[in-house]
Image: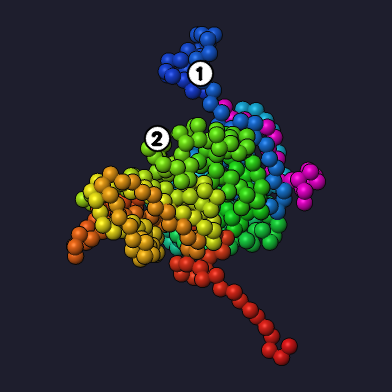
Amino acid sequence: MKREEITMESVAVKVDNVSKIYKLYDRPMDRLKEALRLTKEVKYRPHYALNNVSFQIEKGETVGIIGINGAGKSTILKIITGVLNQTSGIVEIDGRISALLELGAGFNLEYTGIENIYLNGTMIGFSKGEIDEKLDSILEFADIGEFIHQPVKTYSSGMFVRLAFAVAINIEPEILIVDEALSVGDVFFQAKCYKKFEDFKREGRTILFVSHDLGSISKYCDRVILMNRGKKVSEGSAAQMIDLYKKVLVNQVDEEGNERSAIEVNKESDGVTFGAGISEGKSWRSHFILNPKIQEYGDKKAEIVDFGMADEKGILTNTIIKGHEFTIMMRVKSYEELSFPIVAFTIKDRRGTEITGTNTMIEQIPFILKKGEEIEVRFTQKANLQGDQYLVSLGCTGFEGDDFEVHHRIYDGFTLEIVSDKNTIGYYDMNSEIELSRIGE
């Protein structure tokens, strides 16, 4: 259905020019003076958590909202569910909403799990009799055993989210809103929740959820809304918005969703683009969130002075679409003359298992580094790993006679996130082609 053909009868959620403004004061006394009307001078600075955001969601759609931290994603969900009031604009809802926003939102910590089920059901608008009918399905989905009769303040975070999600999803809402809550449960519980998502989609219910899990966004969403700094940047298919999101991460898109020219980007980032040097301006590594407890060691006869990652379009990013090419690049500077140094990378899963990697010796690319020389090494390959987050380690080593030397290693320096809407079994996808034929035909 084209957007211009949508009628109000087909719209579950309509957000029209919604803004949320917070007043920021430099001193607590300024807030008090204004509250007591002791001054006519404006003492605050307005902060737009949301700035004229508009979109609408059709009934039966599964829509994701993505963006960096502080983009306004959670704020718009809270306004839609009535947890917050907007400063201006209109929100219209057609259908009963069930929301799972923050862990424990709407729960009384002193109540037992059973008591909180009835409390939440009543708040949503169900009678005791209606909750009685749904109680067995809620308990079965939560699967927390005898803890259901204990105060929820004694629950682990996993049990807490199991119960909260079980209540939210089993009261059969017409609109389900979820904000990152699934990241708390274990993998088996997440699988059960996503199966429920699929059931909801088949039943024609509406789902709106915020997630940093771009793989889930890609797999489940009919449409995605990208937000940045309180504004809606754009909306479209998951693939389009994930691609645009990667550009937002490296400041290649302005607040209106327009791609910035290379001149603008280079001027602001001091000329840093894929393949650029680091003798002037910002480095590649400055564009990435690095491991805060990064481990580096070696004799420093040579040093990895910069590193980064780029997708097939040359955009600096550690978010890669499964099956697409990406490049890991390093700049290595030598402080002594080195015969046949080895430059390497390794990719591990979050449990520390080495999944893959290579180096210049394995790939049979011998070279010599002169003292003071600096080189750039690029490893380009297809991302056939399963959708998940991985850790990337880098190294520059070599041999002095028969002795193996480590010049510089960066251990678990940064992450690689593979975005996938189809995961097979194991660590990587063999991209099998399947043929099926009926015998006798």
Residue found 61% across the figure and 76% down from its top: 434
Res. 63 visible in picture: no
Q: Is residue 345 above or below residue 266?
A: below
Residue found 50% across the figure and 8% down from its top: 38
Left or right placement of residue 105 versus residue 302 in this view = right
Left or right placement of residue 187 versus residue 348 in this view = right
Q: Residues within 10 Å of mark 1 (few under 14, many from 20)?
A: some
Residue found 45% across the figure and 59% down from its top: 186
Question: Which image quadrant is residue 14 in?
Answer: top right
Q: Nearer the viewer, residue 337 or 435?
A: 337
Q: How is the image coloured?
A: rainbow
User: Residue 280, which numbered label?
Assistant: 2
What quarter of the picture does the C terminus occupy?
A: bottom right
Determine which residue is flagged by label 1.
Answer: 44
Could you tell me the amino acid type at mark 2? Glu
Image x and y of residue 256, in percent: 62, 34
- Look at the numbered disc 1 and give the secondary structure of its residue: strand
- Look at the numbered disc 2 and give the secondary structure of its residue: loop
User: Residue 86, which numbered label?
Assistant: none
Image x and y of residue 360, in percent: 36, 60
The disc, 2 or 1, on the residue closer to the chain's N-terminal end is: 1
Q: Which residues are magenta?
A: 1-21
Could you tell me the amino acid type at mark 1? Tyr
Res. 413 visible in picture: yes
- Pointers 2 and 1 in contact (CB under 8 A)? no
Left or right placement of residue 389 versus residue 137 in this view = left
- The verdict on residue 2 being magenta is yes
